[in-house]
Image (spheres, helix red, strand yellow):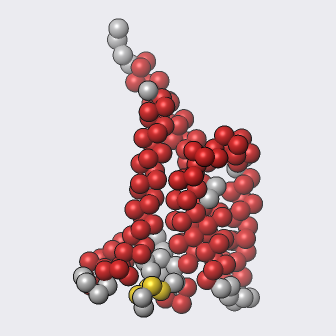
Amino acid sequence: MKKKIIIWSWLLTVLISGLLLAGIFLPAFLAGKNRSLASFIFSLYSPLCHQRPERSYNLWGQQLSVCSRCLGIYAGFFFSAFLYPVYKRSWKIKIGQNFQWLIVLALPLAADFLAGWLKIWDSPLFFKTLTGFFWAAVWPFFWFKALEEFLSSARNVASAGKVE
């Protein structure tokens, strides 16, 4: 039963994060066919991203739904979650037990953000994407661990409440 829950949680995580990632590109595909739907999907990402045109990639002349750094974050989480079953055993102890990885991989992202905010430099879009990607790539190790602990405690609470 536990293995089935782990598989389902992985599948749902990959499906949802994949849909969120695909949604970033969807307005560019829909722009010529259904402008109102494209605008609606684009607006769904506005609470999560500033969507500044000069910091966003364009596809077929249409701005993507998020900036380059947010694209890296969505892509990093998705690809790392997708590949999680392949490398979880070898990396779980190194990364999943150590929150310092989140801080270490956030440093380039934070330095780039701060330098841009202070107008020291403006890094290329690709660099912003990479910093977001590598930072978010460690999240699945913490996400799946937290999800497993939550589901385990929920199962224990549910089984403790059963009357035999």
Q: Residue at 42% across / 75% down in the picture?
A: 25
Q: How many marks?
A: 0
Q: Is residue 103 above or below residue 30?
A: above
Q: Position of residue 161 (x, y in %)?
A: 38, 19
Tell which of 115 and 71 is nearer to you. Answer: 71
Quarter residue 117 falls in? bottom right
Q: Residue at 62% across / 69% down in the picture?
A: 132
Q: Is residue 41 above or below residue 2?
A: below
Q: Is residue 68 above or below residue 62?
A: above
Tell which of 18 and 141 is nearer to you. Answer: 18
Quarter residue 39 falls in? bottom left
Q: Is residue 116 above or below residue 111?
A: below
Q: Position of residue 98 (x, y in %)?
A: 72, 46
From this viewpoint, is residue 44 visible? yes
From this viewpoint, is residue 50 visible? no
Q: Is residue 67 left or right of residue 138?
A: left
Q: Is residue 114 left or right of residue 9?
A: right
Residue lying at the far top of the rendered structure: 164
Q: Position of residue 109 (x, y in %)?
A: 68, 71
Residue lying at the far front of the rendered structure: 86
Task: Look at the image and tell me in which quarter the C terminus lies.
Answer: top left
Tell which of 36 and 11 is nearer to you. Answer: 11
Quarter residue 123 falls in? bottom right
Task: Look at the image and tell me in which quarter the N terminus lies.
Answer: top left
Q: Residue at 46% across / 51% down in the picture?
A: 13
Q: Position of residue 114 (x, y in %)?
A: 69, 78
Q: Residue at 46% across / 70% down in the picture?
A: 48
